Image (cartoon, rainbow, N blue to C red):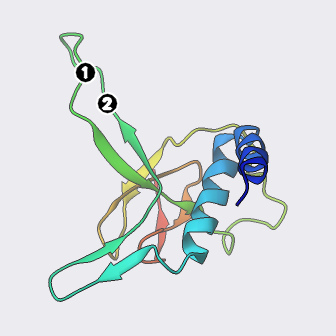
Amino acid sequence: MTEQQRETTIQALAQCDLAEFARIVNLAIARRSDTQTENNCDRTKLTFAQAMQTREDDGSWSRWSTSAIASADLAYYKPDWEFGNGEPFWQFGECLRCHIKLCSHAKATLCPICGAQNTLT
């Protein structure tokens, strides 16, 4: 990729709202052949995640926690459903199959690790 192509890609991604940005990144990760590795002892899989802290009662911040960003389940939503509705990733849950923490802008989602359908709250 040339420097100009890279800059054009960055500019296009920077203009997306968060929901569309996450959709594009998750699709790109899913299409890559080098995002998953396995050997005798370990398996890894690249995912797009959000890190979050919560304000404690004493005003300090909690430890960071991470959740994989799950894409909307398009089998659930109407074809003309708006991705760019501006809602941040305030839907949370745990994948029913692989048990990874998830977040999304949608309630009906697909796990980016195992592909399972999930309903977040």
Could you give the CA–CA distance between mark 2 and mark 1, rounded to whole angstroms? 6 Å
At a point 59% along the width and 53% down the height, the residue shown is: 106
At a point 40% along the width and 77% down the height, the residue shown is: 36
| Residue at which label 1 appears | 61
Upstream in the sequence, badge 2 or badge 1?
2
Assign the N terminus to one quadrant of the image. Answer: bottom right
| Residue at which label 2 appears | 53
At a point 78% along the width and 48% down the height, the residue shown is: 4
Q: x%, y% of residue 110?
A: 53, 69
- Identity of the amino acid at label 2? Gln
Q: x%, y% of residue 78?
A: 78, 66
Q: Residue furthest right?
A: 80
| Residue nearest the viewer, comparing 92 with 27 | 27
Cβ–Cβ below 8 Å for labels 2 and 1? yes
Label 2 Cα crowd, 10 Å radius (few <14 / some 14-19 / many 20+): few
Label 1 Cα crowd, 10 Å radius (few <14 / some 14-19 / many 20+): few
Tag 2's secondary structure? loop
Is residue 42 found left or right of 121 in the rendered image?
Answer: left
